[in-house]
């Protein structure tokens, strides 16, 4: 760039010339971003799979062949269409379960529950963990000591055991599962946000904002948060996947979502007796769970690669 | 309105340093009784080794760190009675590293207009125009308005930092090593820009620097800092030509020459920088001083007026001082 050589005051001719160069010199940030996103294989695959599952969940009432609660014992345990069995029918592409409910419909509706629990628990834990972590990292000193103590206390609690105990004490419902998970898995948010904030806080632009007279609220929200947001996105996806798996585990143990609601974890639990005879009853929700968690993790990794400043060029 | 825009009277900043588990805390006197007067329009250079308290002093002058003791006055008003916004209208910093002083997630335009936004400027429609005015003044092309800092060179970034500091027309600018992170070829451009802006906008600079060549080029007055105290202060010319304090002499003698055959100058300072947690008794400079006298180990020097400022050294102590010591 030639303008560096001017010691002060761009001449008028220079500024007219340079304003004419606007479009040529810099590709717009949007187009650069698009290029990076679509050049990242993991991000495209993860985003694509997640989008399909999301559409499945949203459109479940429209695209489902049946009703997730409709039982028909005369049509129970029909295998999916790729099985060589006389019972196979295109009325039930993925077959039916022990009670004759359409399996594909239950998978679609189960996606709703998994996504809902994953997203809600991630939001709750994200809010708690980010608040604690950013406050500790920004203020340091005594605040940091208190937050560190809370984090250590939380880390010493085994998540699954506490969740099991709480759910068995106060009973199980979707809301209870969401809150129990949300209140338990914020530790990673807090730890990562704390150290990220500490790092950013020491940079000169924070001191510059302070000496401009910016309020602490402004400094945290618009100077620090945008610079730690890429960590936040990654942790959010990891924790969402974590919450989905924990929900499946709780449901499998009978303490999560209660029948007849179609949760993937619960579907695996209901089918565990049929493992040797009708393995697809477990395989199908298992594959769905695997695809969802994998896609979320791929998306998170990709987002980090795409948004990290060190990757910008 | 007086001509003194910034005055520090006997300010001290003490940090409590934890010395280990169950061992209590020890005081570290980062700034230890500093008197400083900044006249309108002058360039006061603050020189000294790393760790002597320059940056702590600058932070106190910016209102970012309250002094433990002593008073600070901005434009005749005590710093404590001013709000952060009022302080920000009078004093602004320019930092050393333009790679960390600009928020990488904000556009140049929003960085430069942030001071207007924070001060609650009434008329947001004029912000863009005011930003472009100041950008022109500091030599930034208008088209970078929507760019991000990562798209700019080091020199351009430092110009952005200068524009941000100056858009609200402060009276005092505290430059903390404004060129030491830049390429040599860009350094002089930034220094010349700072000189031009000082004349154009009537600014007063407090310039913190290691680089004595920069100081000689810019400063009208010099204050030499050693272990939290200003040991010598005076007009730039006088201090450069006729340094009084042995430490100033050593600093001036340490400037490297372009002639390699002359080798690295010997400053007599030795390698050991004293531990600020465990200050030497008497004159804090005596363990490294080439002109150390016996009384320096006990007697802390007082400020003694010189031609254009003051010096703190027992060499220039008159009989009265010696009498005081023996009594």
Image: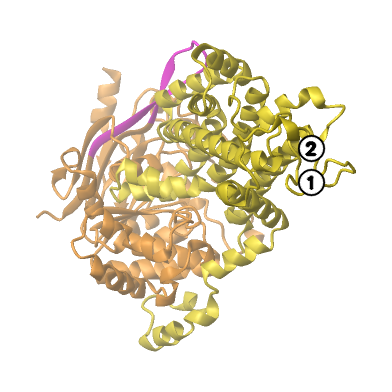
Disc sitting over residue B94 in the figure: none
Residue B112 pos. (x, y %): 35, 63
Is the Cβ of the residue at disc 2 closer than 8 Å to that at disc 1? yes
Query: In 3D space, how far apart are the residues under numbered discs 2 and 1 (Cα atoms)?
Result: 8 Å
Outermost residue to the right? A84
- Left or right of A99: which side holds A169? left
Disc sitting over residue A89 in the figure: 1
Label 2: how many Cα within 10 Å (few below 14, some 14–19, many 20+): many
User: Can you tell which chain is drawn orange?
Assistant: B
- Left or right of A29: which side holds A146? left
Q: Which residues are magenta?
A: B9-29
Identify whether B180 is placed above or below A147. Answer: below
- The residue under label 2 is A78
SS at circle 1: loop
Colour assignment, chain A: yellow
Q: Tell if the residue under mark 2 belongs to the same chain as the one under mark 1.
A: yes
SS at circle 2: loop
Front position in the image: A98 or B207: A98
| Residue A116 seen from this side | yes
Front position in the image: B323 or A105: A105
Residue B132 pos. (x, y %): 33, 73
**Quadrant in the picture for residue B282:** top left
Front position in the image: B169 or B16: B169
Residue B98 pos. (x, y %): 47, 58
Identify whether A122 is placed above or below A273. Answer: below
């Amino acid at each position: 760039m030639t303008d560096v050589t001017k010691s002060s005051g761009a001449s008028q001719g220079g500024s007219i010339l340079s304003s004419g160069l606007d479009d040529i010199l810099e590709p717009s940030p949007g187009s650069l971003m698009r290029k990076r996103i679509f050049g990242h294989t993991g991000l495209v695959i993860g985003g694509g799979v997640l989008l399909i599952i999301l559409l499945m969940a949203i459109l479940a009432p429209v695209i489902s062949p049946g009703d997730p609660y409709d039982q028909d014992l005369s049509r129970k345990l029909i295998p999916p269409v790729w099985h060589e069995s006389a019972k196979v029918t295109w009325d039930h592409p993925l077959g039916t379960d022990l009670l004759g409910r359409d399996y594909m419909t239950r998978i679609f509706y189960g996606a709703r529950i998994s996504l809902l629990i994953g997203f809600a628990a991630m939001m709750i834990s994200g809010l708690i963990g980010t608040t604690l972590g950013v406050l500790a990292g920004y203020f340091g000193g005594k605040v940091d000591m208190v937050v560190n103590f809370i984090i250590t206390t939380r880390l010493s609690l085994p998540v699954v055991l506490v969740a099991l105990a709480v759910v068995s004490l106060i009973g199980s419902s979707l809301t209870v599962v969401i809150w129990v998970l949300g209140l338990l898995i914020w530790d990673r948010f807090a730890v990562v946000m704390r150290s990220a904030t500490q790092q950013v806080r020491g940079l000169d632009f924070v001191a510059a904002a302070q000496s401009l007279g910016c309020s602490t609220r402004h400094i945290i929200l618009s100077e620090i948060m945008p610079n730690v947001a890429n960590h936040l996105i990654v942790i959010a996806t990891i924790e969402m996947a974590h919450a989905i798996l924990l929900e499946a585990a709780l449901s499998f143990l009978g303490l999560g979502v209660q029948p007849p609601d179609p949760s993937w974890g619960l579907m695996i639990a209901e089918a565990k007796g049929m493992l040797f005879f009708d393995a697809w009853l477990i395989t199908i929700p298992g594959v769905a769970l695997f695809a969802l968690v994998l896609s979320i993790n791929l998306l998170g990794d990709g987002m980090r690669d795409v948004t990290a400043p060190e990757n910008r060029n | 309105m007086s001509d003194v825009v910034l005055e520090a009277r006997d300010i001290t900043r003490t940090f409590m340093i934890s010395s280990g588990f169950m061992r209590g805390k020890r005081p570290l006197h980062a700034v230890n009784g500093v008197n400083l007067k900044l006249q309108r329009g002058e360039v006061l250079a603050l020189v000294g080794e790393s760790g002597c308290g320059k940056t702590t002093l600058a932070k106190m002058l910016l209102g970012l760190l309250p002094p433990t003791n002593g008073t600070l006055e901005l434009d005749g008003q005590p710093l404590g009675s001013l709000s952060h916004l009022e302080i920000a209208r009078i004093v602004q910093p320019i930092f050393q590293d333009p790679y960390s002083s600009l928020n990488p997630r904000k556009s140049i335009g929003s960085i430069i207009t942030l001071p207007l936004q924070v001060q609650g400027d009434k008329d947001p429609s004029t912000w863009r125009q005011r930003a472009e005015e100041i950008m022109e003044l500091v030599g930034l092309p208008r088209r970078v308005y929507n760019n991000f800092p990562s798209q700019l060179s080091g020199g351009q970034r430092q110009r952005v930092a200068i524009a941000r500091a100056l858009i609200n027309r402060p009276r005092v600018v505290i430059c903390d090593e404004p060129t030491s992170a830049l390429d040599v070829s860009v350094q002089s451009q930034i220094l010349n820009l700072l000189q031009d802006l000082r004349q154009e906008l009537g600014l007063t600079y407090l310039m913190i620097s290691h680089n004595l060549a920069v100081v000689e080029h810019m400063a009208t007055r010099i204050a030499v800092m050693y272990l939290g105290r200003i040991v010598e202060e005076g007009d730039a010319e006088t201090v450069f030509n006729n340094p009084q304090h042995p430490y100033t002499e050593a600093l001036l003698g340490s400037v490297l020459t372009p002639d390699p055959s002359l080798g690295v100058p010997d400053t007599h300072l030795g390698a050991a920088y004293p531990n600020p947690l465990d200050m030497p008794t008497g004159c804090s400079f005596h363990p490294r001083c080439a002109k150390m006298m016996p009384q320096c180990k006990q007697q802390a020097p007082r400020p003694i007026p010189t031609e254009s400022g003051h010096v703190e050294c027992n060499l220039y102590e008159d009989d009265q001082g010696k009498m005081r010591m023996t009594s």
